[in-house]
Image (spheres, helix red, strand yellow):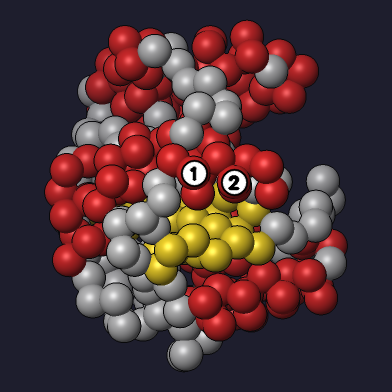
Amino acid sequence: MRVHFAAWWGRLTMDSPGLAPTTSLLGIDFSNITEEAAVRRVLARPVAARFGYVVAPNADHIDRLMRIPRLQAVYRRAMLCLLSSQMVATAAGLFGLEHPGVVTGARLTTALLPHLAGMRVAVVGMKDKDFARVRACYPLVEFVHHEPPMALLDNDEAFGEAVAFVCRARAAFTFFAVDSPVQELLAFSVAMRPEAVGIGLCVGAALEQAVGVQETAPRWMSEHGLEWLHLRGLEPMRRVGRYMLADPRVLVALGVAAIRQKIH
């Protein structure tokens, strides 16, 4: 997918309404918060409050942010920026670097869904048949759905329609179930609209995983930073770029950061 970021630079902001203490790692200010605390914070936020969003960068996202630094402003604008990679946390610890706890988008979504009964929840992304599975699994949630076309960053009209859908929905929560960085740019664009309310969750395929549409790694693999191995086995061709190129670059960056820390 061709990604055209140039049109976004003028709309980026350094404003950061952070709600939790942060720990900086590789130039990213991660929210240092537990999964339980993250769930409590988003549920405690008033439904009618101006739109805010949560991002959960994994190693692939971190690699992109290192290559395209100006995109970091989108992540700084998030109300919570959660580290979603046990591999990165483990490697940082081995290098002697301070790092936040891990709260993956998938685990946050799974923990949050049971609390949404009676709420209006918007979903951007997912095929109709997969969305039907989500609705069937959580019948007490008032879901609304928008399935945008592919390559949203090359389609200004479709991108604008997705943003307008979220603004019209006025949902308590909006799940952006599309690829990164599309989901983060959508959330950022909604946050720039003064009429938008609720909380956006940039969690990719987390909804599909929560209802069993997409298989998840066993918890022991996730806790030991081996989720990448499980996912690579499920989708070897799609994942090869992420895990054979992005992850090593992040590991090298962590090693360089550790050396600089010792020097200073």
For this rendering, which residue is in front, 259 or 157?
157
In the image: residue 202, left or right of residue 199: right
Quarter of the image where one finds residue 47: bottom left
Q: In the displayed structure, would residue 139 be above or below residue 256?
A: below
For this rendering, which residue is in front, 250 or 184?
184
Q: In the displayed structure, would residue 113 be above or below residue 97?
A: below
Q: Decide: marks 1, 2 in contact (CB < 8 A)?
A: yes
Asked if residue 146 shows in the view, the reply is yes
Q: In the displayed structure, would residue 18 be above or below residue 263?
A: below
Quarter of the image where one finds residue 8: bottom right
Q: How many marks?
A: 2
Residue 100 picture location, percent across and down = 24, 38
The local secondary structure at tag 1 comes to helix
**Which residue: 41% across, 51% down?**
139
For this rendering, which residue is in front, 216 or 97?
216
In the image: residue 21, left or right of residue 185: left
Residue situated furthest bottom in the rendering: 194
**Which residue: 23% across, 76% down?**
46
- Amino acid, disc 2: Ala
Residue 227 picture location, percent across and down = 46, 17
**Which residue: 45% across, 16% down?**
217
Q: Which residue is mark 1?
A: 136
The local secondary structure at tag 2 comes to helix
- Amino acid, disc 1: Ala
Q: In the displayed structure, would residue 263 be above or below residue 112?
A: above
For this rendering, which residue is in front, 257 or 100?
100
Q: Which residue is mark 2?
A: 132
Q: Which mark is residue 116?
A: none
The answer for how far apart the CA atoms under marks 1 and 2 are is: 6 Å
